[in-house]
Image: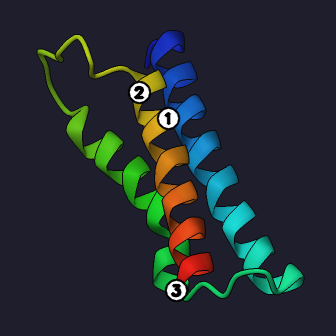
């Protein structure tokens, strides 16, 4: 495995994991939002999509680790906002 590929994987995994933990902590301890288990895991689903989409090439210009990390963060924010509103 190339070191650059490992760094990209760690970036996406770290952001997805941090978003998942943030949702779980906000749901459990603050009482601001109440999120069920499945929506809490939604950022990890983005990471799974990233892993399974990287099996072969060629990749498009928009298919970067940074964009996948942003997608995981956005999914986490959407879950929090949807839970706060509903």
Q: Residues within 10 Å of mark 3 (few under 14, many from 20)?
A: few
Q: Residue furthest front?
A: 85
Residue at horizontal 56%, vertical 79%?
A: 85
Q: Is residue 73 above or below residue 60?
A: below
Can you identify the residue that label 2 sits on? Answer: 67
Q: Is residue 35 above or below residue 12?
A: below
Q: Which mark is residue 86?
A: 3
Q: Residues within 10 Å of mark 1 (few under 14, many from 20)?
A: some
Whichever of callouts 2 and 3 sits on the residue coming sooner in the sequence is 2
| 63 vs 54, nearest the viewer | 63
Q: Quadrant of the N terminus?
A: top left
Which x, y percent locates residue 21? 71, 63
User: Which element carries disc 1, helix, strand or loop?
Assistant: helix
Residue at horizontal 52%, vertical 36%?
A: 12
Whichever of callouts 1 and 3 sits on the residue coming sooner in the sequence is 1
The answer to whether the residue labelled 2 contacts the one labelled 3, judged by CB atoms less than 8 Å apart, is no
Q: Nearer the viewer, mark 2 or mark 3?
A: 3
User: Which element carries disc 3, helix, strand or loop?
Assistant: loop
Here the colouring is rainbow
The answer to whether the residue labelled 1 contacts the one labelled 3, judged by CB atoms less than 8 Å apart, is no
Q: In this image, 59 relative to 4: left or right? A: left
Which image quadrant is residue 76 in? bottom right
| 55 vs 40, nearest the viewer | 40
Q: Which mark is residue 70?
A: 1
Which x, y percent locates residue 73? 55, 45
Task: For marks 2 and 3, give the CA distance.
Answer: 28 Å
Which x, y percent locates residue 16? 56, 49
The answer to whether the residue labelled 2 contacts the one labelled 1, judged by CB atoms less than 8 Å apart, is yes
Task: For marks 2 and 1, give the CA distance.
Answer: 5 Å
Residue at horizontal 25%, vertical 32%?
A: 54
């Amino acid at each position: 495995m190339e070191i650059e590929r490992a760094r990209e994987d760690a970036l996406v995994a770290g952001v997805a994991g941090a978003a998942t933990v943030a949702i779980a902590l906000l749901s459990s301890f603050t009482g601001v939002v109440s999120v069920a288990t499945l929506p809490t895991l939604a950022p990890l689903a983005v990471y799974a999509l990233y892993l399974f989409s990287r099996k072969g090439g060629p990749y498009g210009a928009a298919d970067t680790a940074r964009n996948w990390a942003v997608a995981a963060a956005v999914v986490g924010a959407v879950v929090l906002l949807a839970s706060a509103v509903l």
